[in-house]
Each structure stands twice: as C-alpha cells, then as structure tokens.
Image (tube, grey):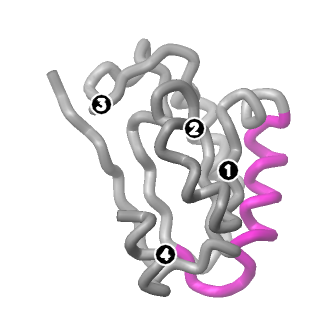
Amino acid sequence: MLQLATTEGVIDPERTIQIGLRGRGLTRCDFSFDSGMRVVLVEEFQKKGAVAIAEEARKIVGSGPCYLTIDTDVFDCSEMPGTTLPEPFGLTGREVRDFLRDLRGLDLVGADIVELCPP
C-alpha cells in the first residue's frame, strides 16, 4: 500500500521515515530505499536512541501535516506476540513510548496501528 500511495503521489517519499525495520521485513524495503524514504533499521534506532531519531523525524517531516502509522511488527516478539510477523530483537514498548513523546508538537492529522493479529 505504501508503494502504491507513493507512486500515485499521495505520499511524499522525501517526507517519509520508516523506523524499526529488521529481519524478514527488510525484503520488502527496496522501494523505500530507492524512492528516497529514510529507513531507520532497528539497530540504528537502538544505537542512536529515541531522542535522536525523533529529532531526525521532525526534520524530515517538517512543519506540514503528517500521519503516523505504527506497525506492530516493530515490537520485539517478547512484548508483542500478537502481530503478523513476530520476530526477536525488535523495539520495546518503552523505546516506542519515548520516541512518540519526543514527537510532541508535530502537526499530526491522523494515526493508526496496523498488523495487530492476536493469537
């Protein structure tokens, strides 16, 4: 869906940042890299920290309206087993919470949570 929305001009890849990708999810990321989206792998997020990544996200998104999607696949499977693609070494709830808190003040016009798949 992200690829279609981008090619149709609904999403500006220069104002898009994907965070926390890892493992099997990386096989679907070629379009994101090729289109100019900023992709932050889980290892980079954990190394730099929530504050630094949130600061970068603010710069990328700018002052215009933005939309936030949280894909539950980003979470470590020990904290979120009920997701479509549970994998180890994901982000913790605390890391995601800290990141979201550091996004305060953005012109957030909507948000959703996807890939929730309770057992």
Q: Secondary structure at mark 3?
A: loop
Q: Secondary structure at mark 4?
A: helix
Magenta-drawn segment: 48-66
The Cα atoms of the two marked residues, 3 and 2, are separated by 14 Å
Residue beneath label 3, please? 83
Residue beneath label 4, please? 6
Labels 4 and 2: the sequence-earlier one: 4
Q: Secondary structure at mark 2?
A: strand
For mark 3, does the 10 Å Cα neighbourhood hold few (<14), some (14 to 19), or many (20 or more) residues?
A: many
Which residue occupies the foreground of this view, 110 or 101? Answer: 110
- Residue type for callout 4: Thr
Labels 1 and 2: the sequence-earlier one: 2
Query: Along the horizontal axis of the image, is 94 left or right of 49?
Result: left
96 to 88, vertically: above or below: below
**Whether label 1 touches label 2, CB < 8 Å:** yes
Which residue occupies the foreground of this view, 18 or 55? Answer: 18
The Cα atoms of the two marked residues, 4 and 3, are separated by 25 Å
Query: Along the horizontal axis of the image, is 58 left or right of 8?
Result: right
Labels 4 and 3: the sequence-earlier one: 4
Identify the residue at image location x=26%, y=26%: 82
For residue 17, which quarter of the picture? bottom right
Q: Which mark is residue 93?
A: none
